[in-house]
Image (cartoon, helix red, strand yellow):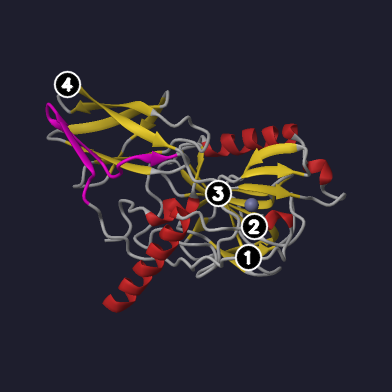
């Protein structure tokens, strides 16, 4: 078992290294058979060991831990705050208020996530804490947002789907998604298995955050990862949760959104068939539907997204970070 864990951990390291080196990929949305110069190493679920905090700050009774050194655009970071009699905490980061969630016997946790478009510089992070005796404290620090490693892609859609190259369709769809993501479940719905790829051992192809030029007429960004998948391939839930949405949207086609609690949502797109319904409780690895070609595609493939606090984040980076309640 230990050997297996080490092997899986090595695979994750290989993927992280490939990402750091900017491994070449192609725009899967441009077609099902685009050549892949460097197949990415598969990623599977692993018990991610709890890391030591990178930065620890104490102010009065409260101690704040940051589990990251800096934040590349589109990444997610974990914060923990604890203290005697601490009753709750909230963070202010990038003009947003972010809730901390209690983990019994382990303090309070929050995710922070600068968007892929956030300017790279230092930003103020304020953590407001309050106590059972009604006293309050604030801890302030700086968080460095750094430039993400994003590639550029040319994507060509056929005449039948060219009408989807329309900024207004994109804006309306994002507004619809934001309304789903705005309902935050304060309970942690993922279980100890944590998060894994929707296709176990699947190959990630077109990367998160890519600058895309559709039909040489519209610039946009890739809000998730594509995975290589044939028509009919079963797609599994990344983690346990509740189905927040199923339906059709112009760009994402037939899609499913799962609420994992704490403001974390995973979205699965371009389905041929959907096997779950809104409100259904989902376990990690449960079949959600089958790969299709619906929405803004020109060939069957699978598109996978994770949003944290209403922001699309690098789903693979989210998979690789330690999260409270999952791993060891
Ligand atoms: Zn995609």
Q: Nearer the viewer, residue 70 or 162?
A: 70
Against 204, residue 51 (above or below) is above
Residue 114, position as x, y percentages in the image: 44, 35
Q: Is residue 42 visible?
A: yes
Quadrant housing residue 222? top right
Q: Which residue is mark 2?
A: 26
150 left or right of 14?
A: right
Residue 317 in the image: state x and y as whole percent.
Answer: 43, 52
In the rendered image, the vertical position of residue 120 relative to residue 244, given as above or below: above
Magenta residue check for 56: yes
Give the structural element (helix, strand or loop) at label 1: loop
Question: What is the span of residues highlighted in magenta in the rendered image?
Answer: 52-72
Q: In the drawing, does residue 63 fall left or right of residue 100?
A: left
Judged from the image, the secondary structure of the residue bearing numbered disc 2 is loop
Residue at horizontal 46 percent and vertical 37 percent from the top: 309
Residue that label 1 marks? 36
Residue that label 4 marks: 135
Q: CA distance from mark 2 to mark 4?
A: 54 Å
- Mark 4 and mark 3: Cα distance apart in space: 43 Å
- Cα gap from disc 1 to disc 4, whole angstroms: 57 Å
The answer to whether the residues at label 2 and label 1 have Cβ atoms under 8 Å apart is yes
SS for dot 4: loop
Q: Earlier in the sequence, mark 2 or mark 3?
A: 2
Q: Mark 4 against mark 3, which lies toward the viewer? A: 3
Mark in front: 1 vs 4: 1
């Amino acid at each position: 078992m230990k050997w297996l864990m080490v092997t899986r951990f090595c695979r994750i390291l290989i993927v992280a290294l490939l990402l750091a080196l900017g491994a070449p990929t192609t725009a899967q949305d441009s077609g099902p058979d685009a050549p892949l110069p460097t197949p990415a190493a598969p990623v599977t679920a692993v018990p991610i060991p709890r890391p030591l905090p990178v930065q620890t700050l104490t102010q009065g009774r409260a101690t704040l831990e940051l589990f990251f050194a800096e934040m590349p655009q589109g990444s997610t970071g974990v914060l923990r705050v604890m203290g005697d009699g601490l009753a709750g905490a909230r963070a202010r980061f990038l003009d947003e208020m972010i809730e901390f969630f209690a983990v019994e016997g382990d303090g309070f946790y929050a995710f922070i996530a600068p968007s892929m478009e956030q300017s790279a510089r230092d930003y103020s992070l304020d953590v407001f804490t309050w106590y059972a005796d009604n006293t309050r404290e604030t801890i302030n620090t700086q968080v460095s947002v750094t430039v993400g490693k994003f590639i550029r892609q040319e994507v060509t859609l056929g005449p039948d789907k060219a009408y989807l190259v329309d900024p207004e369709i994109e804006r309306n769809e994002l507004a619809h998604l934001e309304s789903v993501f705005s309902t935050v479940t304060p309970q942690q719905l993922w279980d100890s298995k944590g998060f894994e790829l929707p296709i176990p051992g699947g190959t990630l192809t077109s990367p998160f955050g890519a600058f895309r030029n559709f039909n040489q007429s519209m610039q946009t960004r890739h809000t998730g990862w594509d995975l290589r998948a044939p028509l009919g391939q079963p797609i599994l839930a990344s983690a346990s949760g509740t189905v927040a949405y199923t339906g059709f949207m112009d760009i994402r086609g037939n899609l499913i959104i799962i609420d994992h609690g704490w403001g974390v949502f995973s979205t699965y797109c371009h389905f041929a068939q959907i096997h779950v319904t809104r409100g259904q409780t989902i376990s990690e690895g449960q079949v959600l539907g089958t790969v299709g070609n619906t929405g803004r595609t020109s060939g069957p493939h699978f598109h996978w997204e994770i949003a944290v606090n209403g922001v699309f984040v690098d789903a693979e980076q989210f998979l690789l970070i330690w999260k409270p309640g999952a791993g060891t």
